[in-house]
Amino acid sequence: MLLWIILALVVVTVVYAIVIFNNLVRTRQMANEAWSGIDVQLKRRSDLVPNLVESVKGYAAHERSVLEEVTQLRGAARALPEGAVAARAQAEGALSVALGKLVALSENYPDLKANTNFLDLQKQLSDLENELQMARRYYNGAVRNLNVL
């Protein structure tokens, strides 16, 4: 009788350990998938930046420092390895600030604000920033769930 009780406890413990392990693996994969979503959005934004810079260049030739800063920060962000999450976050934050300056620069050029290419690029950038924000929220939730487990 005692042997059956011990055997039942061992079986329950093993099954419980397997369930916990599977939950941890699933949650870790969700966190990795969430980071991948952020990475995709960052790459899309990085690909959009040269088009935006070229569109503004013709109108803002003397605002060269802002354009060069955006280009330099884009290159720095793309050069970081995928696993460097903290460094990537810092580089992308600096790029976001520089992009804000670039968009604010357009306020000084009424012809640029009316340019359909620029307006389209600005809308794409805005949509991309919204998608990036959603991807970050998903990532934060997935990592939170992993940490709780």
Image (cartoon, grey):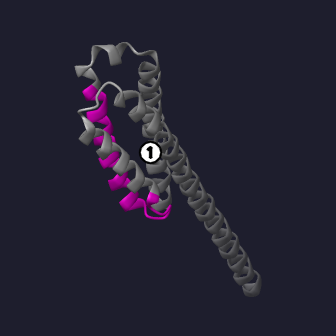
| Residue drawn at the location 42% of the way across and 22% of the way down | 118
Where is residue 62? Give x, y as percent.
Answer: 23, 33
Where is residue 53? Give x, y as percent.
Answer: 39, 35
Report the side of 75 relative to 3 (left or right).
left
Asked if residue 6 is among those painted magenta in the image, a careful observer would answer no
Q: Residue furthest bottom?
A: 3
Dot 1 amino acid type: Arg
The residue singled out by tag 1 in the image is 136
Q: Nearer the viewer, residue 143 or 103?
A: 103
Place residue 70 in its image quadrant.
top left
Report the side of 46 relative to 99 (left or right).
right
Asked if residue 92 is among those painted magenta in the image, a careful observer would answer yes
Examine the rendered structure and indicate whether residue 84 appears above or below residue 108.
below
Place residue 59 in its image quadrant.
top left
Q: Main secondary structure of the magenta part?
A: helix
Which contiguous range is marked in magenta? 79-105
Q: Nearer the viewer, residue 74 or 7?
A: 74
Where is residue 87? Give x, y as percent.
Answer: 36, 61
* Position of the N terminus by quadrant: bottom right
| Residue drawn at the location 70% of the way across and 70% of the way down | 15
Report the side of 53 relative to 10 (left or right).
left
Examine the rendered structure and indicate whether residue 97 appears above or below residue 84.
above
Label 1 crowd bin: few (<14), some (14–19), many (20+), radius 10 Å: some
| Residue drawn at the location 27% of the way across and 19% of the way down | 109
Q: Nearer the viewer, residue 47 or 148?
A: 47
Tag 1, which secondary structure? helix
| Residue drawn at the location 43% of the way across and 50% of the way down | 140
Place residue 114 in its image quadrant.
top left
Looking at the image, how many numbered discs can be counted on the residues?
1
